[in-house]
Image (spheres, rainbow, N blue to C red):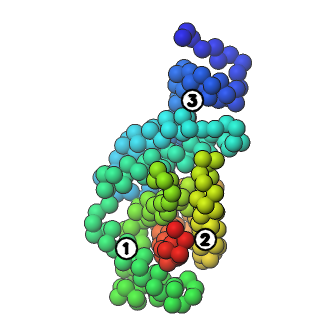
Amino acid sequence: MGEFNFKGKTEDELWKIYKKKRNPAIRDYFVKQYAPLVKYVAGKVAIGMPHNVEFDDLVGFGIFGLFDAIEKFDPGKHVKFKTYAVTRIRGAIFDELRSIDWVPRSVRQKTRELEETVRVLESNLGRSATDKEIADAMGLSLEDFQQLTLKISGTSILSLNDVWYTGENNDKISIAESIEAPSNLNPDTIVEKEEIKRVIVEAINDLPEKEKKVLILYYYEDLTLKEIGQVLEVTESRISQLHTKAIMRLRAKLTSLKKGIV
């Protein structure tokens, strides 16, 4: 095919050419250009993960997501590639983590117990439960409850990407990922997705203010937990606890509503 001449071409122009000709030289250019993004996303995911999860492995999983993003990106949709790629990279990492079943059984059991406690409590109270109310319901001291939220903080980052599955081809909707409605979906599925999106937004809005702020800064402003701690002037471990509790509340609320929607 000969060497491709990149001289004077903008990234937008390169995307248009790649979509038409699938030139491997352009694909390699994009891989090299966005490889640092994979490390950045892997670094964010690595926070709070147990020691048996290696950073280099996360990067390796993420590279598959970058390849997937390059192949599926549609420049005509007016979404920045970086934004689209972050979703695909993060999704690829989480998919691989699920497949290797990295969460210890004891931690998974405690996570389910906490989520169910929050679901029942907040359903009965009609509001967000306090830390003490959740701790009392689980038969824990407040200190032990705080330690538990720290212990399961790594799994909560994964679980946020594991809330909703709907439609064909394992078509995924999650809080942390952008919600797409491709033209090949039938109208009923698109309506269903919009309804789920509405419920997710409402559930986030119902969170206590600090927890809501942590989610927005982490998932939408793309700050690390350490950076959020600096913004809110609290320790990184406190941010990790707020994040975990926010996810537990969201998952509990969405689990209660899910059967009526999906």
Q: Is residue 169 left or right of residue 111?
A: right
Residue 115: % across, % down: 42, 76
CA distance for labels 1 and 2:
21 Å
Determine whether 40 is above or below 174 in the image.
above
CA distance for labels 3 and 1:
40 Å
Q: Is residue 254 in view from this perspective?
A: no
Q: Residue at x 38, y 41 (%)?
A: 56
Element carrying mark 3: helix
CA distance for labels 2 and 3:
36 Å
Q: In this view, which residue lies farthest toward the top?
A: 2
Mark 1 lies on residue: 112
Mark 2 lies on residue: 199
Mark 3 lies on residue: 30
Q: Give the label, 2 or 3, closer to the camera.
A: 2
Dot 3: few (<14), some (14–19), or many (≥20) neighbours within 10 Å?
some
Question: Toward the viewer: 73 or 232?
Answer: 73
Question: Toward the viewer: 43 or 31?
Answer: 31
Name the quadrant containing residue 79.
top right
| Amino acid carrying mark 1 in the image | Arg
Q: Is residue 205 in view from this perspective?
A: yes
